[in-house]
């Protein structure tokens, strides 16, 4: 069993190394996108003209010219082109890193003879692998490789922090954690965190993109190669909403488990309070998207604040706040 | 038929630029009429049930909950509150006045969530009424200019208008649409489930609050320390601690008795690499009990952590455990004056435990003893004892005697687990020059001043059991499940309308078809849905989408 545990650690470090290379490549890709010569003005006007004419022919009404389409036509899956060869390299590295990361998680679970999410280190390990997995999975559906730098960077940072600060040897589970609810409650929390992470990344991109749309000179030029702010917002919303359903389930499953283990399903323990706060924040996010004047930037900020609270909940609350859910043994 | 939504509801159908502009209703608008009392009432009600108010209240609720995690709460950590008061009495007074130690029952927190629920109820009642009407109504008439809608497509197909429309209706019904025929067009709508789910979700939240509010008054919980071999009977006076809600009465306690037959703890040794010592990792705690209920039947059950048992309407949880050495004290004549098991409370992970024994009668003076128990005792270099393992491999009790007035004669209740030694005289241990009394299992020793003997007779273990009766559980669980189901449905079931318009083909041959769709709120797949409808319809008729007009009208910025 010790072999598997050390094998897992070796795989974690290898994954971190490959992720770092992927991160560098993704960043180079974004930098190159900024340096690419802008589409010549004539071609831009021509592109606009074809659109307008076809629109006018069909509708007989005025065509609303979206500022965001003024540069490059957007493909069905939201991609715009403009990506460089670095992106392919980076994505391949990200996949390799993810496979190593997955192996690390699985061997950790095998070493411990249970699901690999029973302490803070393992939670960080599993949450990051599911987070990257979500990124890779969403890529099959829409082109989100512009998020690659954020995802790989965040993953490397998180893995580094959990490995250095939260690492514990494989130990048998405490009786309080010997429950099927460990599998359910924590797994769903991991999934929710992963989706919220992607949603927050997209919201950040949305804010940057919006700033660029409002003022052409603001921000870096690679932002022109991203989908429009409203497309990004739409995608962020759809991903955050999945995360919200998972988080609701985390809350309810946590309450059911609390009833079995602590005698009551809700006692305003610090962890319960923060789970509630995060739930209310994301409920606010969904409401904001349905409130006039709150779509767009304000919704994006709510999503970012929500995800920051998730990170706060995982770190500060676990380590420094007193409660039944304390992680003194990490 | 539109559900009656608040005026500031934004379903994403406005073009992207306009949503950013602030509301220009104030200032620039026409002169507003004067409002009377009723007018103001309606205005305030509309403000309360608007989306913006709900949003602000939600965000306020999140922020208001934060103090509840920063300071100890009376509900979850009463000892912490007491400790806070000891550490910083001035700050405690200020925070207590603000009700920060009871955040979640405080005035300000309650105001927020009560307003939120009033807003919620005020919003969903009209929406439910409208949804009820919508469910029973037919899809609306086909709009005149389909080409302005999402996913507009045109196609040519052979056959007659009637055949095309009949086939169209069949396809739409297969796709679970509700279809209505208007002249030469079909109007279809589906996704009523979305609104139903939405209403169910919000109603379930009210269900949670209502259940807690109504049934919460009938709950109670009590804790009891039971020693191996002892029996506990479910009576108000026999609990160690008990708290009940408002509508509780004694009669609500269904009678039962619980006898702790045995308690087993299993530990595994793990190496603490930083210190090079062994740590005891708890693997399992099991309390074997015999339950006798009102009908006289006895059953044997096991209680484990994470596995409570249900008895006579209460649920029994295994909380803590420890050792309860039996101490026998005899006076100078050899008569037994004290023979009880005393629960020693664990102080560390190797179950070094602290116990208090009070002997107000039987000996020449009132005697209090502070005892330490070491399950696996070893002697350290300093001479002090320590326990290195939580199992009773080498059980040792050390006792220090104090004599004086124990304060029990006043009739004032005293903490059985604490001994106030300020007014007592210490006879053994400490700086008295006399050794503490050290007893192994079965050993006895002389008391000072020839007062008799004390013996460490036996070593049973104890468990602390938490008994809970919570009538809110069933209602809250059902509401939560409904809430999740409603949430999933309301977020992922698309609500949309589709239209198929048919007219005779350009040269009198065949039929010219037009397709379009409309979404209620965010529906990024609408364009694809119209495409699928058209394709399926046409493949049945043998026609094809017109290539010229097959481009998407609106750019792919579908919301």
Image: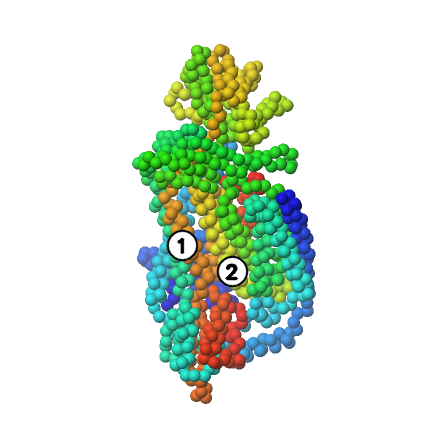
Q: Percent position (x, y) of residue A107?
A: 61, 49
Given contact means CB atoms under 8 Å apart, are the residues at marks 2 and 1 in contact? no
Q: Are marks 2 and 1 on the same chain?
A: no
The dot on residue B482 is 1
Residue that protrudes farthest toward the left in the picture: B251
Furthest-bottom residue in view?
B507
Badge 2 element: helix
Q: Nearer the viewer, residue A302 or B19?
A: A302
Vertical placement of A267 versus B519: above or below? above
Task: Name the spot of residue B15 as percent of width and height, x first.
Answer: 49, 68
Mark 2 closeness class: few <14, some 14–19, many ≥20 residues within 10 Å: many
Residue located 59% across and 41% down the image: A171
- Identify residue for label 2: A237
- Residue at 45 percent across and 46 percent down: it is A256
The answer to whether A205 is drawn above or below residue B430 in the figure is below
Where residue B534 sits in the image (x, y, percent)? 47, 75
Q: Residues within 10 Å of mark 1 (few under 14, many from 20)?
A: many
The residue lying toward the viewer, choosing from B39 and B544, is: B544
Q: Chain of mark 1?
A: B
Does dot 1 land on a helix, a strand or a loop? helix
Q: Residue at x 55, y 27 (%)?
A: B393
Q: Nearer the viewer, mark 2 or mark 1?
A: 1
Residue B90 visible at all: no
């Amino acid at each position: 069993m010790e072999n598997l545990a050390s094998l897992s650690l070796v795989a974690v470090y290898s994954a971190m190394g490959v992720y770092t290379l992927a991160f560098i490549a993704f960043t180079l890709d974004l930098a190159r996108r900024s340096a690419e010569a802008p589409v010549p003005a004539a071609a831009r006007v021509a592109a606009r003209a074809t659109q307008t004419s076809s629109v006018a022919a069909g509708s007989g009404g005025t065509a609303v010219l979206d500022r965001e389409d003024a540069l490059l036509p957007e493909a069905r899956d939201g991609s715009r082109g403009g990506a460089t060869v670095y992106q392919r390299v980076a994505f391949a590295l990200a996949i390799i890193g993810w496979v190593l990361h997955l192996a690390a998680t699985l061997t950790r679970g095998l070493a411990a003879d249970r699901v690999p999410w029973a302490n803070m280190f393992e939670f960080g390990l599993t949450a990051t692998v599911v987070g990257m997995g979500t990124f890779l999975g969403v890529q099959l559906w829409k082109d989100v490789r512009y998020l690659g730098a954020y995802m790989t960077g965040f993953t490397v940072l998180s893995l580094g922090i959990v490995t250095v600060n939260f690492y514990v040897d494989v130990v048998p589970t405490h009786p309080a954690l010997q429950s099927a609810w460990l599998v359910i409650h924590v797994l769903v929390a991991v999934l929710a965190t992963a989706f919220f992470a992607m949603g927050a990344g997209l919201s950040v991109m949305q804010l940057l993109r919006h700033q660029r749309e409002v003022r052409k000179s603001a921000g870096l030029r690679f932002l022109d190669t991203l989908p429009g702010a409203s497309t990004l917002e739409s995608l962020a919303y759809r991903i955050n909403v999945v995360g919200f359903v998972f988080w609701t389930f985390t809350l309810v499953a946590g309450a059911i488990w609390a009833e079995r283990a602590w005698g009551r399903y809700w006692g305003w323990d610090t962890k319960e309070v923060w789970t509630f706060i995060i739930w209310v924040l994301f409920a606010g996010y969904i409401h904001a998207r349905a409130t006039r004047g709150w779509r767009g930037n304000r919704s994006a900020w709510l999503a970012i604040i929500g995800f920051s609270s998730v990170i706060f909940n995982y770190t500060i609350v676990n380590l420094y706040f007193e409660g039944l859910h304390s992680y003194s043994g990490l | 038929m539109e559900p009656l939504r608040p005026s500031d509801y934004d379903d994403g159908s406005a073009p992207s630029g306009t949503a950013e502009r602030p509301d220009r209703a104030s200032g620039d608008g026409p002169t507003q009429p004067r409002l009377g009392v009723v007018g103001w009432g309606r205005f305030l009600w509309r403000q309360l049930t608007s989306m913006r108010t709900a949003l602000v209240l939600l965000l306020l609720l999140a922020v208001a909950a934060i103090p509840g995690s920063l300071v100890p709460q009376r509900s979850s950590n009463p000892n912490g509150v007491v400790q806070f008061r000891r550490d910083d009495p001035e700050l405690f007074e200020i925070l207590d006045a603000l009700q920060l130690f009871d955040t979640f029952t405080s005035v300000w927190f309650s105001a927020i969530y009560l307003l939120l629920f009033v807003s919620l109820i005020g919003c969903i009642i009209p929406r439910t009424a409208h949804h009820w009407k919508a469910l029973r109504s037919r899809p609306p008439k086909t709009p005149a200019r389909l080409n302005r809608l999402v996913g507009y497509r045109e196609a040519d197909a052979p056959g007659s208008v009637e055949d095309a429309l009949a086939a169209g209706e069949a396809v739409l019904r297969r796709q679970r649409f509700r279809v209505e025929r208007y002249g030469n067009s079909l109007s279809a709508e589906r996704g009523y489930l979305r609104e139903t789910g939405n209403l169910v979700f919000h109603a379930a939240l009210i269900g949670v609050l209502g259940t807690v509010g109504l049934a919460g008054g009938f709950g109670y919980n009590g804790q009891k320390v039971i020693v191996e071999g002892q029996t506990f009977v479910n009576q108000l006076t026999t609990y160690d601690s008990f708290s009940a809600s408002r509508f509780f009465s004694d009669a609500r306690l269904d009678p039962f008795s619980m006898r702790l037959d045995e308690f087993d703890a299993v530990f595994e040794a793990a190496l603490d690499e930083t210190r090079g010592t062994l740590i005891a990792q708890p693997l399992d705690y099991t309390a074997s009990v015999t339950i006798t209920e009102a009908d006289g039947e006895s059953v044997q059950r096991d209680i484990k952590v994470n596995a409570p048992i249900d008895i006579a309407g209460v649920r029994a949880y295994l909380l803590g455990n420890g050792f309860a050495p039996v101490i026998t004290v005899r006076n100078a004549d050899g008569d037994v004056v004290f023979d009880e098991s005393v629960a020693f409370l664990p102080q560390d992970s190797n179950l070094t435990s602290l116990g208090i024994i009070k002997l107000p009668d039987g000996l020449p003076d009132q005697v209090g003893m502070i005892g330490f128990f070491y399950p696996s005792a070893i002697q350290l270099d300093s001479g002090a004892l320590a326990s290195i393992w939580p199992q009773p491999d080498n059980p040792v009790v050390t006792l220090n005697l104090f004599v004086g007035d124990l304060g029990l004669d006043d009739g004032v209740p005293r903490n059985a687990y604490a001994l106030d030694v300020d007014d007592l005289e210490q006879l053994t241990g400490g700086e008295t020059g006399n050794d503490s009394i050290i007893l192994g299992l079965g050993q006895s020793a002389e008391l000072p001043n020839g007062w008799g003997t004390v013996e460490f007779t036996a070593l049973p273990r104890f468990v602390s059991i938490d008994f809970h009766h919570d009538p809110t559980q069933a209602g809250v669980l059902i509401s939560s499940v409904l809430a999740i189901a409603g949430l999933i449905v309301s977020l992922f079931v698309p609500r949309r309308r589709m239209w198929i318009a048919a007219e005779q083909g350009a040269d009198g041959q065949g039929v010219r078809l037009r397709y379009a769709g409309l979404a209620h709120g965010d529906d990024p797949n609408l364009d694809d849905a119209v495409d699928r409808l058209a394709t399926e319809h046409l493949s049945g008729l043998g026609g094809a989408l017109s290539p010229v007009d097959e481009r998407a009208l609106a750019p792919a910025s579908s919301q």
